[in-house]
Image: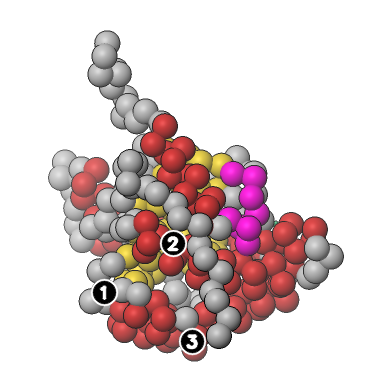
Amino acid sequence: MMARPKQQSLDLSAYTIPTHVAIIMDGNGRWAKRRGLPRQAGHRAGAENLRRIISACVEFDIKILTIYAFSTENWGRPESEVRGLMKIFARVLDQEIYDLDAQGVCLHHLGDLTGVDPTLQEKVRRAIELTKNNNKLILNVAFNYGGRAEILHAVREMLADGITPGELTEEIFSSYLFTAGLPDPDIVVRTSGELRISNFLIWQAAYAEYYPTQAYWPDFDREELYKAIVAFNQRERRFGLVPDEE
Ligand code: IPE
Ligand code: IPE
Ligand code: MG
């Protein structure tokens, strides 16, 4: 029997583990281009990597992982690329969901499913139903998601519910977002060296620590996630206050 390659042991016992990690999975296209491959090969490699990162989150005892999979703006890409991405989402939902279920992953969707192919919608709903009682890791998939669209959606629902200006609080507002009931992200990782937020969790990440990294998403592995957690521990989160010693 072939021995499994031994994973490097990464000790996180001395560190605070962020409860909620959010990732802008960027750079699939450039990863592929660098190898002379079509963009779709980069998206496939990105989907493969997601599997590894989910397992690493379970291993590191991260409780919530939110990933940006497809933005409201990504519909503007060439039709063939959008079609290719939808194919990958459908395949991941078909092939990976039982393994995710076995790992204790509870799937949530952030975004709007209307306008998405009905077969894909059905797969998402089934995956959510299948995993709804799992509690090892909450996996929020931001798919057809935009922070501005989310805020507009919340405002429309609040108006429909008759919430008055006097009643409205930040807590009530948060409870109308797709992330209702979940704590805000502690850290937002963006791969591929870009330094922008691209409409991701614009309300929820108000006090998140930002962690940009040069690695393209398909190369952002378990060790890169470990480095992000170590960097998070070196930050001083002040939330607008003064440091303790002053
Ligand atoms: C991220 O990789 C995946 C999605 C946005 C769906 P990109 O496709 O944006 O890759 P780059 O930024 O072009 O390298
Ligand atoms: C953000 O990446 C969206 C996702 C990762 C799904 P983009 O590649 O779409 O963002 P921009 O265009 O560089 O801002
Ligand atoms: Mg990109």
> Which residue is the extreme one toward the top?
246
Task: Specify which label sits upstream in the sequence, 3 or 1.
Answer: 3
Query: Which of 144 and 22 lies nearest the eye of the viewer?
Result: 22
82 vs 152, left or right, is: right
Counting from the top left corner in percent of width and height, residue 202 is at 43, 46
Task: Specify which label sits upstream in the sequence, 3 or 2.
Answer: 2
Count neighbours of disc 3 (C-alpha within 10 A) and say few if under 14, some if 14 to 19, many if 20 or more. some
Q: Residue at x 32, y 27 (%)?
A: 238
Residue marked by disc 3? 94
Residue marked by disc 2? 56
> Does 174 lie within the magenta span?
no
> Which residue is the extreme one toward the right?
36
> Does 218 lie within the magenta span?
yes
29 vs 139, left or right, is: right
Helix, strand or loop for the magenta stretch, by majority? loop
Query: Does the CB distance between marks 3 and 1 fall below 8 Å?
Result: no
Stretch in magenta = 213-220
The alpha-carbon separation of the residues under discs 1 and 2 comes to 17 Å
Residue marked by disc 1? 134
